[in-house]
Amino acid sequence: MAKKGRVFSGARPTGRQHLGNYLGAIKNYVALQDDYECVYCIVDLHALTTVDTTENLRQNTYEMALDWLAAGIRPEETIMFVQSQVPEVTELHTILSMVTPLGKLTDLPTFKEKVRENPDNINYGLVGYPVLMTADIVLYKSDVVPVGVDQAPHLEFARETVRSFNYRFNTKALIEPQMKNTEIPKVLGIDGVQKMGKSLNNHIELASSPDDTRQRVMQMVTDPQRMKRTDPGNPDVCNVFTMHKIFSSAEEVEMVNAECRRAGIGCVDCKKRFAANLNNSLAPFRAKRDEIGANPDAVWDVLHDGAKRARMIAQKTMDDVREAVQLPR
Ligand code: SF4
């Protein structure tokens, strides 16, 4: 079946993925493969802007790639690779930075947020982050970029940068990417308040053992008003119920919804049910992860092969860019 165009998306190497990563990105990555030619990049250069140490960088890249593959990324059709293995991206980043006003970068809300988060490490790379991101997108001649509401300003920035470049050099060398608005669910951590994330240690890893998963689920915060077993609960404010709606059958969701409200089910039992359903849902992923992970070289081979394919597109783009800018070929 003819594909609708090329999709690009990148994510920082954060190691083993958690439920928030899966529901917020990976699930969508897998689904997009049916309709689009997909280019998925592990953006290790971006990670350098904020990491304290690179000690685990390579391992985190590997673990993330392994999770993507186990979740259903199909490397025979999808290009999956590591950003730094296509050095053309840094060249394009440099060239694009010449058409990017500095004030525009320092005004971006995400830059201000990073400055707040890393007051002791406001490096040049952090300022140029959106330019590198633009280079990532346009280097692979991407038509479409899936973004949630939060990232929309970044994509708009990329589109403006492409227009500036094409105008300044009177060319059509770069393609203005289209935004594919994607509903990215906010997955709360086991604290039931904050977004799930490793830094907050409120996450549930996809690759955890069933026992560890159960233990994490049993720590989940429920309806804060429900103090004892005999109190009726309110599933509408309970993160366990939100997760039931994703991982449990319609009948079980209906039962929990009704029984919680009349104290017919306790939170311990409710969590045990959710943990069992979650473990069942993740069983095929975990089995595939074990199988693929038995040969780590094969995972690296996928990434190296992806980089080769990505680089072929990148070199063509850079030929066009160099021609437009009148740099020697
Ligand atoms: Fe949440 Fe379930 Fe407890 Fe109700 S019974 S408050 S849905 S954990």
Image: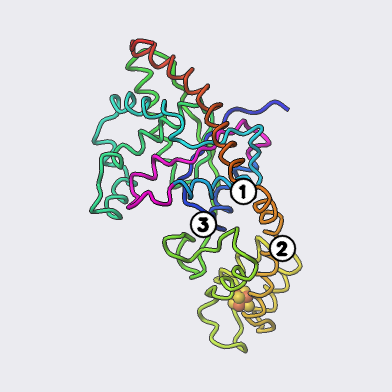
Q: Quadrant of residue 35?
A: top right
Amino acid type at circle 3 is Lys
Mark 2: give few (<14), some (14-19) or many (20+) Cα within 10 Å.
some
Magenta stretch: give its range. 32-57
Where is mark 1, residue-wise? 27
Q: Quadrant of the N terminus?
A: top right
Label 2 vs label 1, nearer the camera: 2
Mark 3: give few (<14), some (14-19) or many (20+) Cα within 10 Å.
few
| 308 relative to 242, above or below | above
Say which residue appears at 50% left-offset and 35% top-offset: 179
Q: Residue furthest right?
A: 251
Dot 2: element: helix
Beta carbon at label 2 within 8 Å of ligand 1? no
Amino acid type at circle 2 is Asn
Task: Choose between 211 and 300: the one closer to the eye.
Answer: 300
Dot 1: element: helix
Where is mark 2, residue-wise? 280
Please state the quadrant of the image where ligand 1 appears. Answer: bottom right
Q: Position of residue 329 (x, y in %)?
A: 39, 11
Say which residue appears at 61% left-offset and 87% top-offset: 229
Where is mark 3, residue-wise? 186
Label 2 vs label 3, nearer the camera: 2
Label 1 near label 3: C-beta < 8 Å?
A: no
Q: Position of residue 50 (x, y in %)?
A: 33, 49
